């Protein structure tokens, strides 16, 4: 994974619900685990913008229900600070469904996408409408 230029405060934990920001057929996700997150014993795995998570589908069409999917978080409500001193926050917590190679499964992303996500996952930036 590529390092990011900002220090994102990780505030989403397993059990948090996310809005799906693409057209893959999913409406709502729930985080199961945070991938590639190391912690000490009994530490809680936390996720933030540009984190890779395993999710289950809460609301969606029948083809994607009852399965575990990978997703990348593209927006979070909690503000975080960039290297230039700006603080960024969004209206909702949102994610985009990806495959094993971190390529998005949808073809359109609704709403803005954080710049840190585009740094780490350039294929998501190609289909994003707005990058903030």
Image (tube, rainbow, N blue to C red):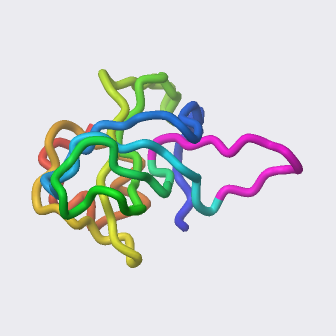
Residue drawn at the location 37% of the way across and 37% of the way down: 18
**Which residue is situated farthest in the right direction here?**
41
Number of residue marks: 0
Where does the image place residue 89, in percent across and percent down from the top left? 39, 24
Residue 44 among those drawn in magenta? yes
- Res 71 → quadrant: bottom left
Tell me if residue 52 can be seen.
Answer: no
* 39 in relation to 99, above or below: above
Say which of 37 and 17 sits in front: 17
Residue pictured at 25% horizontal, 42% vertical: 59
- Please report the residue visible at 44 percent of the width from the left and 53 percent of the height from the top: 55
Q: Which residues are magenta?
A: 37-49
Tell me residue 57's x, y (percent). Answer: 34, 49
- Residue located at (31% from left, 65% from top): 122
3 or 12: nearer the viewer = 12
| Residue 33 showing in the rendered view | yes
Q: Residue 132 at x, y = what percent?
A: 27, 37
Query: Which of the 4 image quarters holds residue 108?
Result: bottom left
Is 14 one of the magenta-colored residues?
Answer: no
Q: Is residue 32 above or below residue 6?
A: below
């Amino acid at each position: 994974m590529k390092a990011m230029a900002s220090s994102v405060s990780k505030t989403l934990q397993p059990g948090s619900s996310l809005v799906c920001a693409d057209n893959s057929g999913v409406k709502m996700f729930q985080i199961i685990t945070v991938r590639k997150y190391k912690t000490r014993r009994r530490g809680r795995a936390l996720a933030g913008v540009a984190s890779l998570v395993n999710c289950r589908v809460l609301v969606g069409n029948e083809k994607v229900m009852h399965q575990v999917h990978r997703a990348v978080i593209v927006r979070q409500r909690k503000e975080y600070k960039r290297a230039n001193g700006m603080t960024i926050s969004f209206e909702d917590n949102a994610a985009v469904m990806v495959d094993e190679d971190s390529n998005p499964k949808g073809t359109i992303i609704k709403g803005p996408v954080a710049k840190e996500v585009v740094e780490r996952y350039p294929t998501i930036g190609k289909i994003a409408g707005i990058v903030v």
